[in-house]
Amino acid sequence: MLVSKNMDISQLSSVLADQPKFRYQQINRAVFKEFVSTWDEVSNLPKNLREKLAEFCPLEIKAKLFKDQKQSKGAKALIYLSDGEAVETVLIRQSSSSGRVRNTVCLSSQVGCPLACSFCATGQAGFNLNLSSAEIVEQAVFWERYLKTVGPEQKINNVVFMGMGEPLLNYDQFIKAVKFLNNPETLNIGARHISVSTAGIVDKIKRLAGEKLQINLAISLHAPNDGLRASLMPVARKYSLQEIFQAVDNYIKKTSRRVMFEYLLIKGVNDHDQEAQELVEKLKKPLYFVNLIPYNETGGRFRAPDSRRVEAFHDILMKGGVPATIRRSFGEEIAAACGQLRGQISDKK
């Protein structure tokens, strides 16, 4: 009787050493195009090969799924790793006016986070480890398998690295995962449909600008000046806003891509008219735009501003010539803030 293991195809080459070359294509299609969950589903492989693959290259993804109450908006999941740790990943489903559904998945790059931002449930829980590129990709494969059960032609349309952890502090594994997701031979997700959010790791932003990838960059800003930012985000003591803006301008110059600045609105902390005016002064540049995010309360000391304050802040930016949008909350009933769900679940199975 085989012991259940986590998905791991690292031994695929040795298993296929005596097989014809076309087996690679068959298996690649089955795992990363058809998103099979077991080798028994791959009927075009010989039975003895399927048994060997089941033993040495398991496909099981251990996870706990939490669906949105409305069932149509999306879901959140805990993916359990081989060492017993768990990471969070989210599926967001959005319908257009034409009725077409777009599926966006939010991926984690670390278990926990070393940045310890004061408003972040993940950061307050501390840092455990970096994920491998395979563990990052596994989250996307999980959602592709799930979407197969939702309906025909349902696929991942967009990927955002905005889950647990700071992706650029796990740069090598993060970029390896991006290239794998983008590869036409695997998940074939277009680079312009992949986004990464960073707290502003300047040297890695510069490195990302040198990659031949047209992915989208987002900066977790959350304050218009270094003093306020440092009180919320310890990383701001290492990287000043001036350094971050210089790195962003270099990224734009090399990629011609718009850069998004994420701004978490926290009641009485960074949501005053003064902060909005400061943002106008700093962010009124070509290809800069702001995504305002009303704070998702996690039980700590911070609170969300009311809708009128959010709209007033937004209006100041728009009138000042800074393009801005307001991100609407998703899935509060399933603890949407990263770190909340993992913190509530201890029965890792």
Image: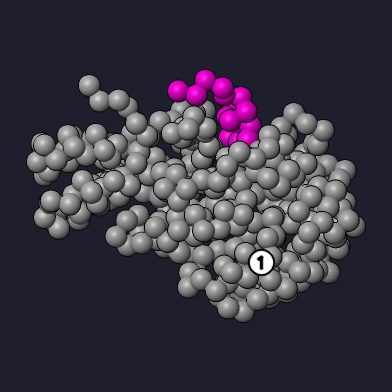
Q: Amino acid at mark 1?
A: Asp
At 65% from the left edge and 40% from the top edge, which residue is drawn? 127
Name the quadrant of the C terminus: top left
178 left or right, relative to 321: left
Q: Position of residue 150 (x, y in %)?
A: 35, 37
- State the image coordinates of residue 214 (x, y, percent, origin top left): 50, 69
Q: Residue visible at 86% across and 53% down?
A: 228
Q: Position of residue 285 (x, y in %)?
A: 73, 74
Residue drawn at x 35%, y 38% as measured from the top left: 7
Q: Residues within 10 Å of mark 1 (few under 14, many from 20)?
A: few
Query: What is the span of residues highlighted in magenta in the rendered image?
Result: 331-349
Which quadrant would residue 254 be assigned to in this image?
Answer: bottom right
Say which residue label 1 marks.
203
In the picture provided, is 2 more to the left or to the right than 241?
left
Looking at the picture, tell me which residue is in the foreground, 22 or 345. Answer: 22
Q: Secondary structure at mark 1?
A: helix
Q: Quadrant of the N terminus?
A: top left
Seen as rendered, the residue at the extreme bottom is 253
- Report how many numbered discs are placed on residues in the image: 1
- Residue 101 relative to residue 171: left or right: left
Q: Is residue 254 above or below residue 204?
A: below
Vertical comparison of 250 with 232: above or below: below
Q: Is residue 226 above or below residue 71?
A: below
Q: Residue at x 32, y 56 (%)?
A: 186
- Could you tell me if residue 153 is visible in this image? no
Vertical side of 108 occupied by 211: above or below: below
Q: Nearer the viewer, residue 94 or 119?
A: 119
Protein image colouring: one colour
